[in-house]
Image (spheres, rainbow, N blue to C red):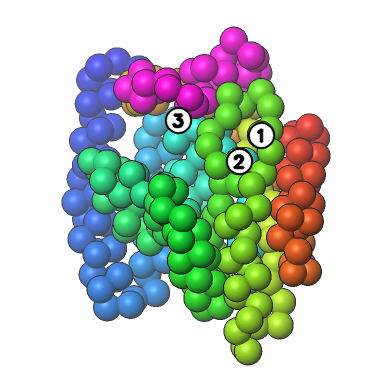
Amino acid sequence: MTKLAVALRLLVLVLCSLVLVPLQMLGLRFGWDVAHHLPVLFHRILLRLFNVRVIEKGTPPGEAPTLVVANHVSWLDIPVIGSVHPLSFIAKSEVEGWPVVGLLARLQRSVFIDRQRRKATAEVNDALAHRLVKGEVIVLFAEGTTSDGNRLLPFRSSLVGAAQAALTHDSVEQVFLQPLAISYIRRNGLPVTRRDRPFIAWYGDMDLAPHLKLFVEGHPIDVVVIWGEPIPFNGNRKEATAAAESAVRRALKAG
């Protein structure tokens, strides 16, 4: 993609943002239903402008209280998942202060957790439970960090306690964990190999700037999003988390 083409696409994105961001702010302020759907539109525009194609498989969450449990490969996971269904994310507290990204995360009604505070998990679980009871879909990247895309890290069960907290509400009979597998399968029209992973995966102490540069240059990327079968939460968060991890692992192997 030429520099002119990149500039034009960035201009379109800015213009769309100037319309959608104020609308989203108003939607959140006044509780409009459109506030759940505008982020989906924004993410779809973003991905379409920069040649990211999302292939969705399986059935997304229904109306029952559902905590989505996903693997995590890159910052690109956010717009990819955000483009397929109205939902919010659980994010580390430092994201809230990042320029631009922090604003977008707040507009998507992300739940921020401060991992340095011992009581943070319990507080976040309580907040998440109230959101789940209202029928909202929340995404938890259960590995706790991004991976290199070549392997699945063990899922952590601490924030799955939100499902347990939601069950204490009288209006809730069942809470589900829904596995979600994200797999980047093609880059520039060719199958993704281990050599390509560093161009897509963002993990460890890797700089974000090179990833953003490659993204805005519009190198075509195909990504598969696979919704697994919802898992009824039985009150045992470690057991439920292990079941979700196994389902994501199987989906990644199956492609």
Circles 2 and 1 in contact, beta carbons < 8 Å: yes
Q: What amino acid is found at the position of numbered circle 2 in the picture?
A: Glu
Residue 33 is labelled as none
Q: Which disc, if any, is residue 51?
A: 3
Q: Nearer the viewer, mark 2 or mark 3?
A: 2
Q: Residue furthest bottom?
A: 170
Per the image, label 2 sits on a secondary structure element best described as loop
| 252 or 151: nearer the viewer | 151
Helix, strand or loop under label 1? loop
Is 248 or 124 nearer to us in this picture? 124
The first of marks 1 and 3 along the sequence is 3
User: Which region shows up in magenta?
Assistant: 186-211
> Mark 2 or mark 3: which comes first in sequence?
3
Q: CA distance from mark 2 to mark 1?
A: 6 Å
User: In the figure, 161 relative to 210: above or below?
Assistant: below
- Crowding at dot 2, Cα within 10 Å, few <14 / some 14-19 / many 20+, comes out as some
Q: Is residue 193 magenta?
A: yes
Q: Is residue 214 at all visible to an observer of this figure?
A: yes
Camera-side mark, 1 or 3: 1
Q: Helix or strand or loop: what does disc 3 sit on?
A: loop
Q: Position of residue 185 (x, y in %)?
A: 64, 27
Give me the disc on residue 143: 2
- Amino acid at dot 3: Asn
Residue visible at 28% across and 23% down in the picture? 5
Which image quarter is the N terminus in?
top left
Q: Residue 243: x and y, percent? A: 79, 52
Kind of residue at disc 1: Leu
For label 1, the residue is: 153
Examine the rendering and report whether any part of residue 89 can be seen: no
- Is 36 magenta? The answer is no
Place residue 193 in its image quadrant: top right
